Image: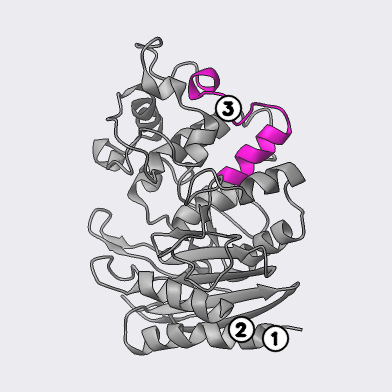
Amino acid sequence: MIDCENLADLGFAPVAAALAAGRIPGAVLGVLQDGRRALRFDGFAQVVPERAAMAASTVFDLASLTKVLHTTHAVLRMVERGTFTLDTTLGELIPDLRQYDVAGAAERKVTVRQCLTHQTHLPAVEPLYTYGQNPATLRAFILQREWRQGPPMYSDINFLFLGIVLERFSHLKSEIISPLPGLSFRPDPANCAATELCSWRGRVMRGEVHDENAFALGGQPGHAGLFGNADAVLDYAEALLAGGTLAASSIAELRRRHSSTRTLGWEASHPGWSGGAACSDATIGHTGFTGTGLWIDWERRRAWTLLTNRVHPSRHFDSGIVALRRAVGEAVCA
């Protein structure tokens, strides 16, 4: 039987080194194996303007983990209920999308599947918050602008559209778009790790979403905004590994490669990726800009989450998070 506590100790060794070097303020590592889990933590949840110690229960701004722990999950639940299919187009789901160019707009032809797998013409990101902070107006802007076209890439815009789809159908399936147990869009700031001292908002962000676009859109779009602690993140991974929370057909879609690097919503194991080189080819994962991540190795029946506040007090510092994630994955899986 594999010793889960030993896996956590091995995985936390590179995290401890990063903490000692001052590369990150604090971190929590959680490892799940065969239904057993172990957590390791150290450092600080906040260092400015005052210090607050990290705890195993510290809640993190999960950033783009929102894409898989909330939006992908909710979309697949909608598909299971027959509300729409993976190949339904955005134009069918959002009739007013590009309503002044219904016949020619490329955005109207994009499918749910293409958004989930980042196989669209849409850009990676856009500073939408610089156009104002009225959520309704910003949503209208997202729907009516002609988005610049380019090659497929990982895109927040894909998930902004999916978030709007979920909002449009929320009156039909309100229980589906609510956060899963242990996760929240409105956490208690006192329980949260701090993120950035934001020059735009003029304060340290703690318990408020770090992502500027998510903040301007009201804190609950499709690409970011979710908060949770390590246990809540591992709860989701454990449910997936046990075959729960989604139908078998949906879990199969989460595991199936739709490109060399992507499944539905998730990133698939590939050379140089965030999960390291020691995991199996059947591993999926996702990261968040604030310093978070979750990886699930279906072959080993193992999952691990590394939650850090690496953007605190500033993103403009080389935290070494890319190498740290790989080192943790290799230690946990080697």
Q: Which residue is mark 3?
A: 87
Q: Which residue is mark 1?
A: 3
Q: 181 or 283: which is nearer to us?
A: 283
Quarter occupied by residue 333 = bottom right
Residue at image point 44% right, 41% down:
118
The residues tagged by marks 1 and 2 sit, at their Cα atoms, a distance apart of 6 Å
Residue at image point 51% right, 40% down:
116
- Marker disc for residue 50: none
Q: Residues within 10 Å of mark 2 (few under 14, many from 20)?
A: many
- The residue under label 3 is which amino acid type? Asp
**Looking at the image, is mark 2 or mark 3 earlier in the sequence?**
2
Q: Which residue is mark 2?
A: 7
Q: 20 or 11: which is nearer to us?
A: 11
Magenta stretch, residue numbers: 71-94
Label 2, secondary structure: give it. helix
Q: Position of residue 171 (x, y in %)?
A: 65, 28
Quarter occupied by residue 199 = bottom left
Q: 102 or 131: which is nearer to us?
A: 102
Residue at image point 31% right, 24% down:
145
- Is 128 drawn above or below residue 225 in the view shown? above
- The residue under label 1 is which amino acid type? Asp
- Is 41 drawn above or below residue 186 in the view shown? below
Do the CB atoms of the residues marked 1 and 2 lie less than 8 Å apart? yes
Magenta stretch containing residue 86, yes or no? Answer: yes
- The residue under label 2 is which amino acid type? Leu
The residues tagged by marks 2 and 3 sit, at their Cα atoms, a distance apart of 40 Å
Q: Position of residue 296 (x, y in %)?
A: 61, 63
Q: 254 or 210: which is nearer to us?
A: 254
**Looking at the image, is mark 1 or mark 3 earlier in the sequence?**
1
